[in-house]
Amino acid sequence: MAWNGPTTMPNTHQASRPTRTCAGCGRKGAQGELERFHQEAGELAPGAGPGRGAYTCRRLQCFERAVARRAFSRILRRIVRVDPSLSRLYTGH
């Protein structure tokens, strides 16, 4: 039997997308499917920003649960004030 060199496995690794966890329900999803929050001057701010980020599903229920459980402060590792008007991101009002 002739030696054919080292055997290689076929490349089955696909490009992976970043996965994040919802602060409200704990569901894991692609980064683009979730709403991102960060802190600015001690207040919760939506969208991309410097530092740590917290994510929620795009459902008002998940945002409200994260607020009630103080998940944003825990995930961002600092106390943040949550403006109730941020709920407009989920309701469109």
Image: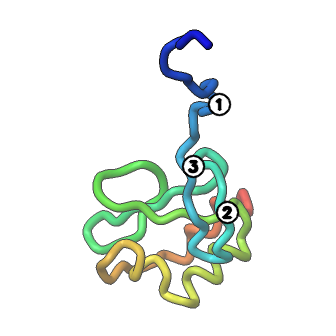
Residue type at numbered disc 3: Gln
Q: Quadrant of the C terminus?
A: bottom right
Residue 31: which disc? 3
Nearer to the camera, 88 or 13: 13
The crowding category of the residue bearing disc 3, from other C-alpha atoms within 10 Å (few below 14, some 14 to 19, many at least 20), is some
Q: Which scheme is used to colour this image of the protein?
A: rainbow
Mark 1, Cα crowd under 10 Å, few <14 / some 14-19 / many 20+, is: few
Q: CA distance from mark 1 to mark 3?
A: 22 Å
Residue sitting at x 68%, y 74%: 62
Q: Quadrant of residue 40?
A: bottom left
Q: Vertically, is 16 above or below 72?
A: above
Image x and y of residue 34, in percent: 62, 55
| x, y percent for residue 55 | 54, 63
Percent from the top left, x then y, of residue 67? 55, 83
46 on left or right of 78: right
Query: Is 13 or 66 nearer to us in this picture?
Result: 13
| Residue holding disc 1 | 12
Q: Nearer the viewer, residue 30 or 7?
A: 7
Residue 82, labelled with which disc?
A: none
Looking at the rendering, which quadrant does residue 2 occupy? top right
Helix, strand, or loop for circle 1? loop
Look at the numbered disc 2 and give the secondary structure of its residue.
loop
Q: Which residue is rendered at x = 58% and y = 89% of the image?
A: 68
Q: Nearer the viewer, residue 86 or 15?
A: 15
Give amino acid for label 1: Thr
Label 3 residue SS: helix
Which mark, by number, is residue 57? 2
Q: Amino acid at mark 2?
A: Cys
Residue at image x 31%, y 77%?
77
- Which of label 1 and label 3 is nearer to you? 1
Q: Earlier in the sequence, mark 2 or mark 3?
A: 3
Say above or below: 71 vs 59. Answer: below
